[in-house]
Amino acid sequence: MGTRRTPRIAVITMGHAPRPDVMQEIAPLLGDAEYEEFGALDDDPESTIARMAPRGDELSYLTQLRDGRHVILEAGFVTSRTETLVAALDGRDYDLLILAMTGMRARLSTRTPLIHGQDALDAWISALVASNSRIGIIFPLASQQSAASESDYGTMLKSSLATIGSSQSSDLTQAIDRVSGADLIVMNSVGYTGEMARQVARTSGKPVVTACRIIGSTARLRLSEIAGKPLDLQATTYTGAELLRRLPQPALETLTRRETEVLVQVLEGAANKSIARTLGISHRTVEIHRARAMLKLGATSTPELIRRALRQSER
């Protein structure tokens, strides 16, 4: 009987690698996979980077260098370097490439499965917006906020800015005030840390999710698909209904009947299309009910819900 090879992942960030602030949130979601970090600017000297500051109000990106400094760079330069790096890593026997960055919307064609950070964020937000949830988004730069306002999210968004790297506590407090009316707050930069998210949650009283958590959860799901098996196999000793009953009751009471039906099947590892066929509804409707249920339960992934249920059953 053969043994399964440990998955290999390449994690790509905009600036210099390594990024411990990014990986402390993403790595725990990757299970036993091995990962290597790469920065799009790893081979660029300081002199080149210094020349790539944006001019005027053009689209720009905020990233971090190996000495810990945060810099704002012209978007085209960073995009070009990222495309070159992704092309070089593609085909090097990685099982998954993770673009751990937000703001960049360049289309990348790869042979290796790719998690595009901005695409993962867009899909997550769009599902919530479609369910009539009010989303607050905190951005690091005004140009990224403007670009998002021109997207297809719709009108259910509130947004604000919070600097990363300097005076962030003051700026973060002001940003929280501007998104306080949202049902859930998304911190749209991999530079926003878990501690910053906890600060926003404490102050706002709202669920908060970081870009790193969304990207990491998406990668975990993709790894499961690549392996061809459901997540958290130890949970298969329970039915979805049993797992759901083990979650804290106050949150469960907010779920609608349809949200409960969908979540029971999600916890059993069923795919959205399979759930749609079983319930006689569209794939898109399943996505909406699933997103609303996850929001009400304050969870970012199915494995997180399963772990909560299993912990309750051990008490």
Image: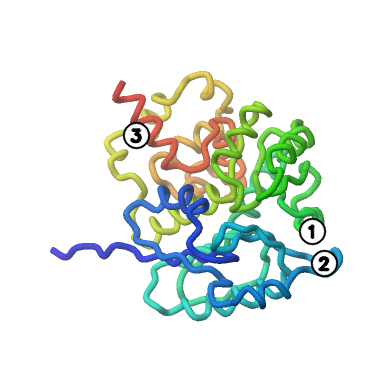
- The image quadrant where one finds the C terminus is top left
- Residue 8 appears in view: yes
- The image quadrant where one finds the N terminus is bottom left
Residue at image coords 75%, 36%: 179
* Circles 2, 1 touching at the beta carbon (< 8 Å): yes
Q: Amino acid at mark 1?
A: Ser
Instruction: Tell me the CA gap for discs 2 and 1.
Output: 7 Å
Residue picked out by circle 3: 239
Instruction: Tell me the CA gap for discs 2 and 3.
Output: 52 Å
Q: Which mark is residue 58?
A: 2
Secondary-structure class at tag 2: loop
Which is nearer the N-term, disc 2 or disc 1?
A: 2
Which is nearer the N-term, disc 3 or disc 1?
A: 1
User: In terms of image quadrants, where is residue 37?
Assistant: bottom left
Q: Position of residue 207 (x, y in %)?
A: 61, 33
Q: Which residue occupies the extreme right position in the image? A: 56
Residue picked out by circle 1: 143
Secondary-structure class at tag 1: helix
